[in-house]
Image (cartoon, rainbow, N blue to C red):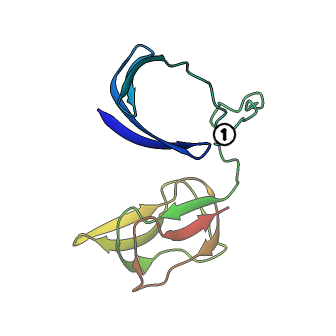
């Protein structure tokens, strides 16, 4: 049971809603009982509706693109300290040549060349501390 006060054209009405189901309401207005049929009206929402255009993907966009850079980046597989560097900028290396040795997790680890090429840059020095994923050497 809900109670409301309505003011219509200067007159005050005490309205009690006693029962409401399936669009029929039993109400009492200023002590007089009434049975009222309620019609639903569709009100326009004030909330804007976002309409987006369909996304058109270019042909082949679902395929994984390989990086076609001619530079190979050698990164640190684990955090550690650089112990010794075996190459210098401009040196030619072949696959599996020793590039540097570093200590990680109390073990000495050898970093080797992943491909043939020329050492383009060396980003670390002996004694440097590196984190996992840090760039060590670039081979062109």
Report the side of 60 relative to 42 (left or right): right
Give 88 or 65, whichever is nearer the viewer.
Answer: 65
Image location (x, y in percent) of residue 89 = 63, 76
Secondary structure at numbered mark 1: loop
Q: Quadrant of the N terminus?
A: top left
Q: How far from the left and from the top, in percent, is residue 36?
A: 46, 18
Please give the name of the residue rendered at 52% of the width and 62% of the height, measured from the top-left corner.
74
17 to the left or right of 113: left
Instruction: Relative to 31, say whether 93 is above or below.
Output: below
Answer with left or right where residue 138 lies relative to residue 23: right
Q: Which residue is mark 1?
A: 65
User: Where residue 101 sits in the image (x, y, percent)?
Assistant: 38, 72
Percent position of residue 9, x then y? 62, 43
Spot the residue most to the left.
Answer: 106
Q: Residue at x 67, y 73 (%)?
A: 90
Foreground residue among 30 and 75: 30
In the image, 75 versus 85, the foreground residue is: 75
Relative height, residue 108 to residue 18 (above, below): below
């Amino acid at each position: 049971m809900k109670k409301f006060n309505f003011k219509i054209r200067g007159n005050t009405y005490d309205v009690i809603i006693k029962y409401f189901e399936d669009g029929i309401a039993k109400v009492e207005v200023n002590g007089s009982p009434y049975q009222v049929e309620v019609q639903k009206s569709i009100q326009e929402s004030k909330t804007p509706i976002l309409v987006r255009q369909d996304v058109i993907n270019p042909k082949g966009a679902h395929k994984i693109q390989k990086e076609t850079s001619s530079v190979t980046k050698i990164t640190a597989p684990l955090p550690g300290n650089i112990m010794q560097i075996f190459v210098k900028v401009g040196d030619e290396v072949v696959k599996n040549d020793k590039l540097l040795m570093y200590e990680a997790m109390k073990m000495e680890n050898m970093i080797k060349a992943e491909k043939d090429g020329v050492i383009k840059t060396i980003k670390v020095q002996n004694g440097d501390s590196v984190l996992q994923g840090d760039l060590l050497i670039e081979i062109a």
